[in-house]
Image: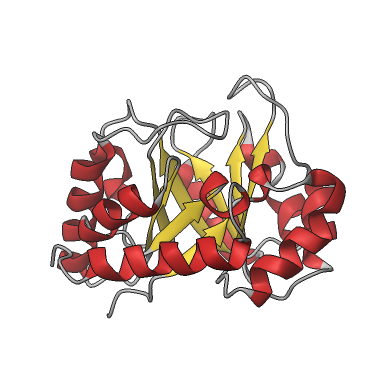
């Protein structure tokens, strides 16, 4: 199976919460491929962010895929809630208190895609047992919990390892990178084989959203030309 197309997913954690609908519409008009929503419970990571009501509100403003990143201790309790709220892909952490097998079965029974994320300190081979059934593998480029962090270079060999494994098994799963993505790091992540790029401050920071997305897409395309196979 061919790997998926390169996609950019603005992270709404970096947008203006008071004008979230406008932030979504602006990015969609500028060519965003999906939106990323960080759900934090204050336990798995030391921060509190979005709940299902916010996901549902974003869904009312766009038909693009919603990538819901569950940085929570017990994702099994909330899979159905976020699926009903409009999530397209539900991404759980392998470090959370959950059975990946059960989450895969539950998510697919709910009609959503299922992804697994690993933190920077988690060995990449933790994801191998479920690789053939995952719709996304997310490699964190920062320690989860806060936006605006710098990219950790150690994520690159993990991306390469997952890319090679996905290709070897014929999987079309997305290889996602989340955290610290700029026009510079996007090139390296794409070269390492990533296909799904979560972009926060690099979209909603300085400059216009349209200009920023265009610059990021150009960077991703440049990197993909030398991607591992």
Q: Residue at x 44, y 37 (%)?
A: 94
Where is residue 221 shown, x and y percent of the image? 31, 71
Where is residue 95 shown, x and y percent of the image? 45, 30
Q: Residue 121 is drawn in which quadrant?
A: top left
Q: Residue 30 is drawn in which quadrant?
A: bottom right
99 to 229, vertically: above or below: above
38 to 84, vertically: above or below: above
Quarter of the picture holding the C terminus: bottom left
Where is residue 214 shown, x and y percent of the image? 48, 69
Q: Residue at x 47, y 44 (%)?
A: 100
Residue 158 vs residue 33, the one in the foreground:
33
Where is residue 196 shown, x and y percent of the image? 42, 61
Tally of numbered discs: 0
Is any atom of residue 134 visible in this view?
no
Q: What colouring style does the render use?
A: secondary structure
In the visual, does 217 lie left or right of 45? Answer: left
- Outermost front residue: 207
In the visual, does 112 lie left or right of 228? Answer: right
Q: Residue at x 56, y 45 (%)?
A: 201
Q: Residue at x 32, y 48 (%)?
A: 185
Is any atom of residue 53 visible in this view?
yes
Quarter of the picture holding the N terminus: bottom left
In the visual, does 67 lie left or right of 183? Answer: right
């Amino acid at each position: 199976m061919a790997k998926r197309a390169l996609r950019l997913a603005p992270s709404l954690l970096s947008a203006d919460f008071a004008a979230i609908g406008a932030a979504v519409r602006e990015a969609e008009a500028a060519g965003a491929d999906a939106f990323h929503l960080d759900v934090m419970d204050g336990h798995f990571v030391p921060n509190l962010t979005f709940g299902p009501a916010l996901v549902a509100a974003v869904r009312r403003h766009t038909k693009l895929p919603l990538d819901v990143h569950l940085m929570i201790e017990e994702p099994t309790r909330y899979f159905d809630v976020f699926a009903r709220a409009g999530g397209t892909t539900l991404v759980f952490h392998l470090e959370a208190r959950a059975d990946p097998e059960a989450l895969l079965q539950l998510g697919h029974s709910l009609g959503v895609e299922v992804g697994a994320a690993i933190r920077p300190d988690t060995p990449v081979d933790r994801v191998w047992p479920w690789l053939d059934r995952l719709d996304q593998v997310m490699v964190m480029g920062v320690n989860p919990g806060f936006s605006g962090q710098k990219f950790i270079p150690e994520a690159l060999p993990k991306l390469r390892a997952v890319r090679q494994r996905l290709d070897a098994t014929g999987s079309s799963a997305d290889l996602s990178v989340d955290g610290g993505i700029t026009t510079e790091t996007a090139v390296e992540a794409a070269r390492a084989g990533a296909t799904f790029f979560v972009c926060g401050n690099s979209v909603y920071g300085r400059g216009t959203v349209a200009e920023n997305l265009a610059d990021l897409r150009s960077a991703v395309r440049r990197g993909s030309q030398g991607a591992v196979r």
